[in-house]
Image (tube, rainbow, N blue to C red):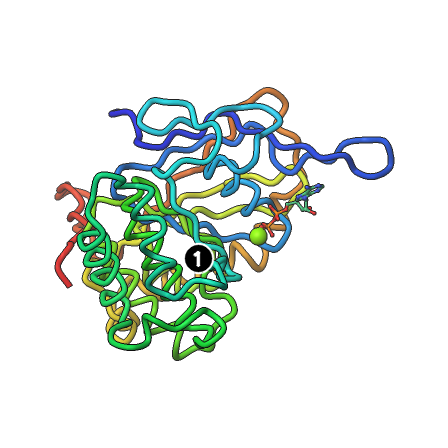
Amino acid sequence: MSKPFLSIERLTQQYPDGQGGTMTVFENASFGIKKGEFVCILGHSGCGKSTIMNILAGLAEPTSGVVKMDGFEVSGPSLDRGVVFQNYSLLPWLSALKNVTFGVKARHPDWSADKVEAHARDYLAKVGLEGDVVYRKPSQLSGGMRQRVSIARAFANQPKLLLLDEPFGALDALTRGTIQEELIKVWAGTEQTVFMITHDIDEAILLADRILLMTNGPFARVAESVEITIPRPRSRTEIVEHPNYYAIRNHLVHFLGQRSKELAGKQSGDADQRPETVRIDKTAPAEDEPSAPPPLRAVNI
Ligand SMILES: Nc1ncnc2c1ncn2[C@@H]1O[C@H](COP(=O)(O)OP(=O)(O)O)[C@@H](O)[C@H]1O
Ligand SMILES: [Mg+2]
């Protein structure tokens, strides 16, 4: 097997439990992500999703284990890894445009001011922000607009890896739907790899190539890697008609509703905890006619 772009190897996170002992969030978690993949992670609150993401971002150190990107160990934050949090971490004293140019300038110190601005405007336009609105400060923008600026800012820096922690959690359903589609369009035109935390099953099916499922903590595990066998481009209204949609959805609902608890709380000992691959495909040919699975990543929307 070729080496994955992102390799998470025997990651363990423990915290003091407040009573003189330790609490193990997860232990020996190991998985890989391929270049250009869009991976979502689903699991109940408190299982350790944000902890994993902060480690991938280089914002936190695990108790043990390593993360390698392109073969190099991740340590500390880097412009190669962009992060978008739920609570829009924009600089409040800068306009939407300046919030984006700020990072682009740091990334490309050799670019002229005009080039930096044109690049930033291009990414803002990709998420529907054009005209006078780009001169507004975050406090003068709606929640949806602020999150669009955060996404434009992250993509404009062209990080190799984009990390999103429940980026749409605070948005209403309509705004969320529009921004999901914008996100997928921006991603589809790039080689970027996305790791996104969400608690919304339908959002994960719409966006992801693969969904990682976590059991409840402590001793949480990334138990399954579920392939989303629905070709792209996908649209919210059409995917529900796909023969695999409800089969995949039911599998995810069952995992989160029942199996995430049943599988919880087991110590791994020394074993590597690797997710099991789950491929649900009702359109696959019968077993006596083996053929390669169709490519799932189509980049034209
Ligand atoms: N700095 C910390 N100190 C102690 N416990 C923490 C700390 N950060 C997270 N935790 C605990 O680790 C577990 C996982 O947290 P988190 O990664 O935020 O979960 P999720 O994002 O899946 O909701 C939780 O039980 C949380 O209380
Ligand atoms: Mg979290």
In the image shown, does 242 or 69 lie closer to the viewer? 69
Marks counted in the figure total 1
Q: Is residue 145 left or right of residue 88?
A: left
In the picture, which quadrant includes the C terminus? bottom left
Q: Residue at the spot x=27%, y=40% of the render?
A: 109
Looking at the rendered structure, the kind of residue marked 1 is: His
Up-down relation of residue 264 to residue 156 (above or below): above
- Give the image location of residue 287, x and y in percent: 20, 44
Q: Quadrant of residue 73?
A: top left
Q: Is mark 1 within 8 Å of ligand 1?
A: no
Q: Which residue extends farthest right?
A: 19
In the image shown, does 262 or 47 lie closer to the viewer? 47
Up-down relation of residue 290 to residue 228 (above or below): above
Q: Quadrant of residue 221?
A: top right
In the picture, which quadrant includes the N terminus? top left
Q: Which residue extends farthest top?
A: 270
- Give the image location of residue 2, x and y in percent: 25, 25
In the image shown, does 126 or 195 lie closer to the viewer? 126
- Give the image location of residue 216, x and y in percent: 62, 48
Q: Residue at the spot x=27%, y=76% of the render?
A: 237
Q: Is residue 219 left or right of residue 19?
A: left
- Give the image location of residue 177, x and y in percent: 36, 73
Q: Tell me the residue that label 1 is attached to.
A: 251
Q: Quadrant of ligand 1?
A: top right
